[in-house]
Amino acid sequence: MAHDSTPASHSAPAGPGAGRRFELLTLGDELLLGLTPNSHLTWIGQQLGRHGVQLARNVTVTDEAAAISAEVRASWVRADVVITTGGLGPTCDDRTREAVAAVIGQRLVFDATIEKAIADRFARLGRQMTPNNLKQAYRFERGEVLPNAHGTAPGLWVEQDGRVLVMLPGPPNELQPLFTEQVLPRLARLGLISESEAYVQLRTVGVGESALETKLQPVFDRAGPALSVAYCAHPWHVDVRLSSPDGRLSRVELQAIADECAALLGEDFANYGHDSLARVVSDLFRAQDKTLGVAESCTGGLLANMFTDLCGASKFFRGAIVCYGNDAKMQILDVPESLIAQHGAVSAECAVALATSVAETLEADYGLAITGYAGPGGGTKDNPVGTIYLGLHSPQGVWSKKLHYAAARTTLKERAVIVALDWLRRELVRAARQISTPPRRTTLIG
Amino acid sequence: MAHDSTPASHSAPAGPGAGRRFELLTLGDELLLGLTPNSHLTWIGQQLGRHGVQLARNVTVTDEAAAISAEVRASWVRADVVITTGGLGPTCDDRTREAVAAVIGQRLVFDATIEKAIADRFARLGRQMTPNNLKQAYRFERGEVLPNAHGTAPGLWVEQDGRVLVMLPGPPNELQPLFTEQVLPRLARLGLISESEAYVQLRTVGVGESALETKLQPVFDRAGPALSVAYCAHPWHVDVRLSSPDGRLSRVELQAIADECAALLGEDFANYGHDSLARVVSDLFRAQDKTLGVAESCTGGLLANMFTDLCGASKFFRGAIVCYGNDAKMQILDVPESLIAQHGAVSAECAVALATSVAETLEADYGLAITGYAGPGGGTKDNPVGTIYLGLHSPQGVWSKKLHYAAARTTLKERAVIVALDWLRRELVRAARQISTPPRRTTLIG
């Protein structure tokens, strides 16, 4: 969906990892047949990016030994770090390890420690170890083993001729902890990536990339050429990444510049780092000890689903009424039939009634309502398909907001939810300010 | 999540596309930085798979001209069809087209028809055309233009030395219609892919791959060696793909074999083709003119969100109560406080009460409830984290079902929803059978 939102600029890393070439080989027919998205590219690309390295290339091939060895050979001659995913499991092509060993000019050796780890794992699960599992007990002669706490195939690590080869198991729940706990620290120790996050990231919402640039450029000009700035535009927000590739600016100095930007941006600044907007809103609710109830018509549960994906949601999220039909709006949330008859279910009036009623019904401090025409059917002359009303009931009052997007059904749902989340975020930030900043008169007396 | 669910076997295509090598180049820093998933690989891989071709290789590189031309050169010498995505827009590297033209030994020519299409598009949107848009008006000298109805950059098509090069714009809403409406028919006309779907697919739920194979192998043995069978295991279902690579079995014969499999599998057969389980259930509800209300506790709106992603959901889906807290269960759905005190909110008793009450509250024929401990907190000795109860109220009665999975929060939610959907599907299929098949006695009299 977001292929059109390309980052505007990238800082060429000059610190650790500068000029180093990282290539990723993702192995598996299921990726080429479109049965499984290539989540390893996305996840590993993000992880390396945070540590100052942009992946140079990703190749996906079948998990046949011949294809793998051709790709490893091509990458091995020109990359500093080659990472492979998949192709290591008991049902994978038997010759994968041999083929790679031949490319790097090593022999495979049987490792009794790996065998024991596999056998222990089977014993712990109370299952019988089949003989094909034993091929996972081979490692490269002059290489190391990266133990896999969540599966049978360990990762394999080779440092050779100034290059690194890392082979990782395919299942994400095995690969991800192995990568963060073992691969990243080893790469950092070799100076191939930054030890810590390579940049300070400001996440902004509701302001376009060029407007952002106009606003922030004076700050960046004052910081001088040691600062590198990259903008990453996502569908609904823009990230600003501040780094100092040659290390002339310390982390503290980068953070000070970021703080200056945040102050300038005011409410358009959402958070530092990588948290989602749903997470930011969830943290604000929990910090303020306030609760939320939601009425979703056209978004049909999407907002509730986002909140309940987060651990600890029950601390603030009282629940949602997915009032998809008008009957549900009237019966469960007591929206008067006459209101719907006069203004329609897609109206500011209905949004406000739903927001207030859902807060009351669920005994929540805040009530948020979303009602609209997601299409392709429905809509009126005044409120065509793509029209969405949001209603927000808070301890401070109750308001509505009208949106209109020309987009497909699922995209419309996403946009409405992001705008709703951003509205909640802004209200909670304002509410916190009112609580923490005493009224001016009091200050004068004090 | 599903990298461990690799397809068990693949039929090597012997019909159109047999032995032809297809390679895909996906261009864009946003893919390598993990800002955007590589959805083109997944989508194009699926489309080609349906037409009998397995993509041999996918390479993702930055959209710099040098990187692109190196990859196109490498693919062009060994592949029969090379498809590129991205790198064609007005903000992309100016030299992308030139670099590719150099590789295939062609010149670029300015095409006034493309210029006019771009200008018309800007006029239609009431916007000013910036000069950088004009670089999109170049095509290969001995090549064709694939008009883009949804954006400014058209696709480019070249047939040369028995090979095909297709360059497609990056935004999925532009690429996808262009691919299905123009690229697939052209490839079929050249005999590079099957004209129609290359296989008949049976989608099965609730039965493992090896059990499936045991059950179906006798049918396949009778069909003989002209039949090719491939199993594709997904996280929650297994697809069986029947094809006849050499064309000895007609589509009608393949369908007859598939029908025999479906009859053998009974309720474990869900549908032909590629529809999701939510779509299958939605179609059953609509065909039987029945309605559904949902009470979601631990799945927090995921099921409602899936239904409301489908057009026409309002025809059967009355809504959902996301009763995340116990208060919501008691206040909105009238679950007695004493029931929760005695049995707990995660219990068969509560699931049944929620299912019945949500059907009544939303005036629906069917009521479905999901309540469980999604973790990481919560749980009791008898019902630890990962325990989920489903409740189903139907015109035939009311039942509960207990599940337990050791998985992360979001995976648990997904599994619970899939099991719930499958339960609805089976109940609706049974209900339809009772309606359409008259009781035996009646038949005897007739």
Image (tube, coloured by chain):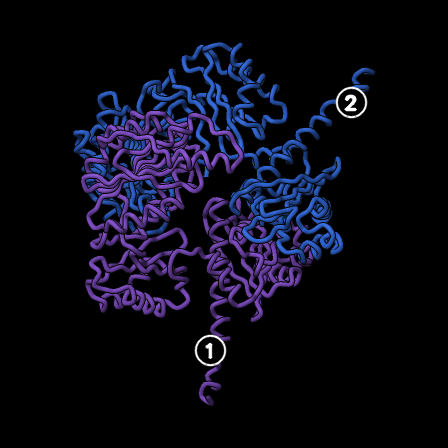
Chain colours: A blue, B purple
Residue B263 makes an appearance in the image:
yes
B124 relative to A23, above or below: below
Q: Give the total of numbered labels.
A: 2
The residue depicted at 65 percent of the width and 54 percent of the height is B329
Q: Tag 2's secondary structure?
A: loop
* Numbered circle sitting on residue B437: 1
- Residue of label 2: A439
Side of B286 relative to A77 (left or right): right
Q: Label 1 lies in what chain?
A: B
Q: Nearer the viewer, residue B290 or A154?
A: B290
Q: CA distance from mark 2 to mark 1?
A: 75 Å
**Identity, as a three-letter code, of the amino acid under mark 2:** Pro
Q: How dense is the environment of label 1, judged by Cα within 10 Å: few (below 14), some, or many (20 and up)?
A: few
Q: Residue furthest bottom?
A: B445
Task: Judge the density around disc 2: few (<14), some (14-19), many (≥20) Cα neighbours within 10 Å.
Answer: few
Residue A143: give its label: none
Q: Horizontal and vertical percent for residue A90?
A: 27, 46
- Does residue A154 appear in this view? no
Frontmost residue, B283 versus B146: B146
Residue B105 in picture, x, y percent from top left: 22, 30
Image point (57%, 30%), residue name: A205
Q: Position of residue A425 (x, y in %)?
A: 63, 33
